[in-house]
Image: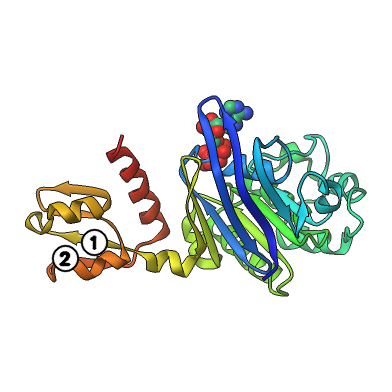
Amino acid sequence: MNNAIEIQKLCKNYKDFLLNNISFSLPMGYIMGFVGQNGAGKTTTIRLILNMINQESGEIKIFGLDNVQDEQKIKQDIGVVFDDIYFVDSWKVREVERAVKSFYSNWSSKLFDQYVSSFHLPMDKKVKELSRGMKMKLMLAVAMSHEARLLILDEPTGGLDPVARDGLLEILSKYIADGQKSILFSTHITSDLEKIADYITLIDHGNIFYSGTKDDLLESFCIVRGGPHDLTDSLKEKIIGLTTNIAGFAGLLPTPEMKHLAPEIVTETPSIDEILVSISKGDRNHE
Ligand SMILES: Nc1ncnc2c1ncn2[C@@H]1O[C@H](COP(=O)(O)OP(=O)(O)OP(=O)(O)O)[C@@H](O)[C@H]1O
């Protein structure tokens, strides 16, 4: 299978943070959600992929090419959206297009106009006059107007209302429909990923906790709940992010451990949010 992104043993060291030897791949034609708590290392990983910061060690390949040596070639094929707008404040929407299009050999003004119109962006407004959601939509329009084969989105839905978010998810699903495009989508709004992501990479304190299909992730764990007397010592050790109170306990359990459960214990399929919260509680329980 061809990979849009292939990361091997990537490390980055800051004073108080280590991106610890991470590896994961995004297969061509799919959407990968990139999730983790604040400060887990998502933006650092994205900056490394885009060669905006230097890595200490490891390898990053985009469409099979080295992200540093072949940077110029690769960047023609990537569209990026960050949570901060990077266009000049005094530019009007039309001027943003004029400024950006010269960088891309595949730029399509027709596509840009279509996105601007479907996002209801006013062509004559200046960047500084746009709302946060409008700025986000402008960055998305730019990212998608040069037929990029890889979109890298860092919190793209943060400023969008639920209707606009839903519209965006539809656009992203259509964007990858030809099987030739891929999206790495970092977000805290995991319900968006439940709708459209095929793969999930979950990063926890600079380590990859999980990378694989969303379905496998949700099948790999279950939420368990039981009364105070159902919690044995051996079960306690296996539960990630255990919470207890007078009524009983709850937490996340690796699915293979389900076969040892007493029949009174209730199990449910977790949401991505529940997995994230349990992992973070598990980290705190071990501190
Ligand atoms: N330039 C830098 N110098 C020192 N530390 C940094 C630098 N950039 C990021 N960090 C640290 O690296 C860690 C990971 O930050 P990063 O921005 O990658 O997290 P994130 O997962 O994107 O978080 P969030 O969800 O809050 O955006 C944090 O502890 C942050 O303080």
- Please identify the quadrant where the N terminus is shown: bottom right
Number of numbered discs on residues: 2
Looking at the picture, how far across and down is residue 16, in whole percent?
50, 27
Q: Which residue is mark 2?
A: 265
Look at the numbered disc 1 and give the secondary structure of its residue.
strand
Query: Is mark 2 in CB contact (under 8 Å) with mark 1?
Result: yes
- Label 1 lies in ligand 1 vicinity (Cβ under 8 Å): no
- Local packing at callout 1 (Cα closer than 10 Å; few below 14, some 14-19, many 20+) is many
Give the numbered dot on residue 123.
none
Protein image colouring? rainbow
Q: Residue at x 70, y 73 (%)?
A: 179
For label 2, the SS is loop
Q: Looking at the picture, how far across and down is residue 264, in whole percent?
A: 12, 68
User: Where does the image place residue 94, in percent across and percent down from the top left?
Assistant: 86, 49
Q: Is residue 62 left or right of residue 195?
A: right
Please tell me which residue lies in front, 80 or 231. 231
- In this rendering, the answer to whether 75 lies above or below 88 is below
Q: Earlier in the sequence, mark 2 or mark 1?
A: 1
- Amino acid type at mark 2: Ile
Residue 249 seen in the figure:
no
Which residue is the extreme one toward the left?
229
Quadrant showing the C terminus: top left
Residue 127: percent from the left, percent from the top? 76, 40
Name the amino acid, label 1.
Val
Numbered badge on residue 224: 1
Q: Indicate the quadrant of ligand 1 in the picture.
A: top right
Give the CA separation, mark 2 to mark 1: 7 Å
Asked if residue 142 lies left or right of residue 107, the reply is left
